[in-house]
Amino acid sequence: MNETHTKKEKILLLVKIVFPILVTQVAMYLVTFFDIYMTSRYGTEDLAGVSIGSSFWVPVYIGLAGILMSITPIVAQLMGAKKKEQVKQAVQQGIYLSLLLATIVFAFFYFGIDSLLTLMNLEPAVADVASRYIQAMSIGLIPLFIYTTLRSYIDALGATRVTMVISLLSTPINILFNYLLIFGKFGFPELGGVGAGLASAITYWLILAIAAWIIHTRNPFSVYGIFRKWPKLSLSRWIEISRIGVPIGISIFVETSIFSAVTFMLAAYGTYTIAAHQIALNFTSLLYMLPLSISMGATILVGYEVGAKRFRDARQYSWLSVVTAVSFSFVSACILYFMRVEIAALYTSDPVVVELAVQFLLFAALFQLSDAIQAPVQGALRGYKDVNITFVMAVISYWIIGLPCGYLLANYTDFGAFGYWIGLIIGLTAGAITLSIRLLSIQKKIARHTTT
């Protein structure tokens, strides 16, 4: 990365950083996307089971992996401050931490998932698919967590095209193994939704191997010697990673788990409603990859400028990211609104599921603007290493405002199941407003200190 002087240069650098991240995020998400999509072509019960399984898997994985995302602002600021000699230790300690977190999550799923599913009173076939799907996915926990650390390191060096190429390889690998293991082709066992979980685990191991090979053999990564001369565990470095990463991880967990909580509550409405909700959520999450990618780009660029003490440039990158995301949110909303019938029909031919999914997609179109604001604002705040207040705001917005509103609307109005999605809109809007106020406050505080 390099210093920019004009808005045009900043826009070009933002695009240069964000586009590969976007392709990477889409490619990584397509692993889950095709799990859902290909399972939906297999059967409604398997789709519902994978939906429930994903609702446990995604927030737990993303929340803890969010801790490892702290490697991005840490390394970005070290690079901006010309402290390259400290990069290796930060990444290696991140790998150690990723192994610990993967072990914790594996134990949680292995010993606790069946008990949690029992509490939900699911249909036996749906509960069985959900349990075995999660167990199959857990085989890929270690490579997925380590890859998250390595990817954060690669992105922090500004080499986002490398992670783009790696992630692009993951999509065809996952589709191939999904085809073989879900439908039982070419002599492979027919596992249905469980096959989707096993296919994802295999994919995660393969992309970790590719990433490790590139980092070990190719510049500019190999010069840091990430896989050479492993140090002892450093408590001080773990504390630094955790101090930044834990609030990031919890914030992401709070945001993603609200969708999982809605899925669990919708279980009371039956298999068809769960399936329709998952279809809408699955496609909406694909569109969310754009503001999420802009958010990650904002973390890199803002962190780099803050490390170099170019606070004016950091502020410009922050709001340039927001404006870009908001502009594209109108396109996403139009896609969801005008093509909602076609989108639902892509997943299933069941008329009941299609009718419900079309209605869910209408509500999904309504929260595109809020998502487009809160995501890059959070990314910018991470670039400033301001994560604690962000976490508190996320908890209040999603769990104290959004979910209770959804519950009241679902149970005490005629909205029914759709009331939970209105609650999501309310929570995301509250988050967008409060986080924007926090970012403005941080920037004004820095401006006062730099002018005095």
Image (spheres, rainbow, N blue to C red):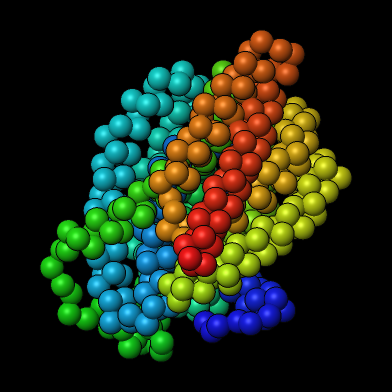
252 shown above or below 49: below
Residue, x 75% and y 39% (percent of image)? 366
Q: Is residue 316 left or right of residue 61?
A: right
| Image coordinates for residue 374, horizontal then vertical, percent | 61, 48
Nearer to us in this view, 177 or 197: 197
- Residue drawn at (28%, 76%), measured in percent from left and top? 86
**Residue farthest front in this picture:** 452
Q: Where 218 falls versus 235 (above or below)?
A: below
Figure check: 447 above or below 60? below
Q: Position of residue 285 (x, y in %)?
A: 62, 48
> What is the x, y in percent for residue 161?
55, 77
Viewer-proximal residue among 56 and 400: 400
Nearest the viewer among 227 and 35 is: 227
Res 326 quadrant in image: bottom right
Residue 281 seen by the camera: no
Q: Residue furthest top?
A: 412
